[in-house]
Image (cartoon, rainbow, N blue to C red):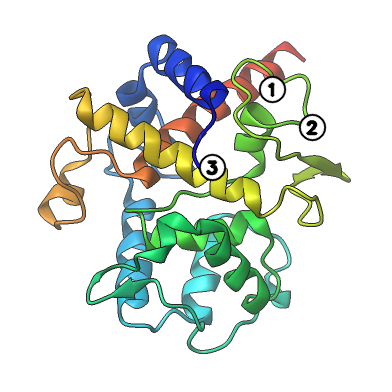
Amino acid sequence: MTLSHNHIDIINRFLQEQDMPDLYRSYTWKGDTWEKGFPDLFRLEVLCSQAAEAYSLNENHVMEIAKWGSLPNTKTISCPDPVRITLYIDGKPAFWLEKEPENAVCILGCQVSGFGPTYCSKILHFAVPQVFGAIDTRLVRVFGTGDADCGGRYQLLDLSVALSGNRWQIPRDQKVWPGEYGTWIQILNHIARTLNSDSILCPHPPQYLQSGLREEGQWLPADVETALFSYASQVVKELKDKA
């Protein structure tokens, strides 16, 4: 599958109207800020990517992601040791991942009890940032459907969110899941390639460069998702401030 002309048009409009390096720098989650070097993002990426390369992703890594994301009811979480998925071959991301990203999130969904679409995609974000980014309710509210107050300006996805009590969720039983996760990964990769070809540099914190996780200025799909999450967070905050 390739991105439609409509996808490309919306992406181009977004990149013209928004400042991706500034959005990346503006990312915050709990104690994580650009000024601090995104310590939690960095720690989880080192932990999970090394484990994925060694075929040793297990419940410890899954629980670390759950705690970082403040997932409620972690007592239901369990998975094989190790999780049975091949993400790297000879130290490089497996060739099939970018072609069939929805398969990877499905494999995790079948093996990690207590994790839905959002948290399975977070595993992939940290394990293989060269290919993947996460998809969560905040991103779907803004770039998908289901929240008319936040979405619509840049609709890139047919994926929907729904309220469950007072929490948003991405229902895994909707027909477009996991196919739209595949679309999302194509979008992240397309944006990364566009920014890199246009020499719009990603302002990685120093530890990402010193550790070898990143090449200076070069966007990875996970970096793009970090910036888009920052944008979505701003949209959601503006809505709350108006309420």
Residue 143: x and y, percent?
A: 62, 29
Q: Earlier in the sequence, mark 1 or mark 3?
A: 1
In terms of secondary structure, where does tag 3 sit?
A: helix
| Residue 184 numbered tag | 3
Residue 63: x and y, percent?
A: 55, 72
Q: Is residue 202 depicted above or below 182 in this figure?
A: above
Label pair 1/3, CB-CB below 8 angstroms:
no
Identify the image quadrant of residue 162. top right
Foreground mark, 3 or 2, reads 3
Look at 39% across and 84% down and name the residue there.
Answer: 56
In terms of secondary structure, where does tag 1 sit?
A: loop
Distance Cα–Cα, label 1 vs label 3: 16 Å
Residue 125 visible at all: no
Identify the image quadrant of residue 33. top left
Instruction: Kindly identify the amino acid type of the residue bearing the numbered disc 1.
Output: Gly
Q: Determine which residue is flagged by label 2.
A: 146
Q: Is residue 14 left or right of residue 211?
A: right
Q: Residues within 10 Å of mark 2 (few under 14, many from 20)?
A: many
Label pair 1/2, CB-CB below 8 angstroms:
yes
Instruction: Kindly identify the amino acid type of the residue bearing the numbered disc 2.
Output: Gly
Look at 41% across and 32% down and name the residue there.
Answer: 227
Residue 76 visible at all: yes
Distance Cα–Cα, label 3 vs label 2: 17 Å
Q: Earlier in the sequence, mark 1 or mark 2?
A: 2
In terms of secondary structure, where does tag 2 sit?
A: loop
Residue 93: x and y, percent?
A: 31, 65
Q: Earlier in the sequence, mark 3 or mark 2?
A: 2
Q: Nearer the viewer, residue 198 or 119?
A: 198
Q: Determine which residue is flagged by label 1.
A: 151
Q: Is residue 160 left or right of residue 105?
A: right
